[in-house]
Amino acid sequence: MMVTFVSQCEKNARKKTRRVLDAFADRIGDNTWQTLITEDGLNTVKKMLRQTASKSTAVSCHWIRSRSRSQLLWMVGNRSKFDARGVVPVNSTQQAITQFENDWRYLPLIQSLAGLAALFHDWGKATRLFQKKLKDASMLGDPIRHEWISCLLLHALIHSCDSTSDDRYWLTILIDGDLNEARLKSIAGERAQKPLSQLPPAAQMLAWLIVSHHRLPETSDDWRNESAPNMAIVLKRITQAWGYENRRDEKNYHSRLNDCFEFPHGLLSQSFRWLKQVRKWATRLQGCLPLVQQCMNDRSFRVVLHHARLCLMLGDHHYSSQNADPHWQDTTGLFANTDRKTKKLKQKLDEHLAGVSAHALRTAFLLPVFEREPPVAQDIHSLKKPSADAFRWQDKAVGEIKRWRQQHAKSKCGFFAVNMASTGCGKTFANAKVMRAISHDGESLRYILALGLRTLTLQ
């Protein structure tokens, strides 16, 4: 067969790719090769390219079928350098994000909540016990989880104000950067049983994001229903017993519990960069207080918190996986996590909070774009290939769906299916084939795949 190779490689990948392709094909341009080759030889080329591939590698192979037609066979490396047909883009267009924001009334509130919640979500890691645990991996889990301590500190901040019913008071403290650490430690040490209750509206929303940024509170009854009059009813029922305490170490429980309320290195008020971000997003949230009241009245706070929590958790998950910022000055002596491989201290606590906030906000700003322009799978060539004999039922299901679409082409009926089979039967790949078959043109693929098992997501 006659084939053409196109290379869009960068950096050192250019040299490696050229060495492989020069051995099998004639170079007819700076980044183009052409040759007659057998199928076995083509498989050898693909295998050798994969062995030397890196993030900078991008090679496509086209089978010249006739003088007027060619077919994309495969791509190796960075597929974003080509489109679904293997064509290299030469121009790009973009739209301003602001045009998508017009109908997102609560977007400024979502952004403000996500940004400020991220700056306080791990505040409770400043305890003596947590800092000890980071240095000694053999220690047991905390008697009280750090997100509960963070809520106690937020509760202490609000109750250190002249008024606990108005969000403007505690936000003003943050805007002024006037954290009275001694008073905060004292009130937090009282260990309020229900710190999420009796808070003003914006603080309620912030407390919920902080307490649920790892997992939702455990409860035996379902209080998340439409009959709940307001958010305060929900928060009043949450205590540290709802999944935030650990009594496995009964022998030293009380001494370790006391260490959860000792803050020998302070509460980050020495960090100028952290305080700067706190001031900024406290000011933004103060400007959104009318939206807070409005979403509480029309009961849309569930949707607002859902999006804000998504942004917070994505930001936390992403930034926690990054290396520590080598240029971040340590002004607090507090750390947020350790390196999984070396077990050594990694990100400073204020660095982690600011970094999570930045990434959470990046997601929040893009929410309207995801609504209008969700990502599309570009390379679905493998979904068009016949399945192996053991999974031939996949093609049979696709064929039935195509016949169904032809019969109902003029109607606007929906489609609902349940795919049930044993583990390893090919359900995941079959679902992708099915979703392609029921797309508007039968050739594209855009769908959400939610994998509940960690073992599957790691594949």
Image (spheres, grey):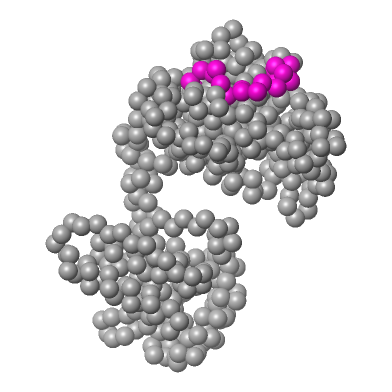
Total labels drawn: 0
Task: Indicate the position of residue 247 as horizontal and vertical percent values.
Answer: 75, 38
Where, quadrant-wise, is the C terminus in this rendering?
bottom right
Residue depicted at 60% across the width and 74% down the height: 52
| In the foreground, 398 or 111 | 398
> What predominant SS class does the magenta segment belong to?
loop
Task: Indicate the position of residue 357 as horizontal and vertical percent values.
Answer: 57, 36
Give the quarter of the image for residue 402: bottom left
Note whether 412 is above or below 66 in the view shown.
above
| In the foreground, 163 or 140 | 140
Residue depicted at 26% across the width and 81% down the height: 68
Q: Which residues are the magenta region?
A: 184-202
Task: Indicate the position of residue 206 as horizontal and vertical percent values.
Answer: 54, 27
Indicate whether residue 197 is drawn in magenta. yes
Give the quarter of the image for residue 51: bottom right
In the visual, does 323 lie left or right of 5? Answer: right
In the visual, does 314 lie left or right of 151? Answer: left
Task: Indicate the position of residue 414 as horizontal and vertical percent values.
Answer: 24, 57
Looking at this view, name the residue that lies furthest to the left.
410
Where, quadrant-wise, is the N terminus in this rendering?
bottom left
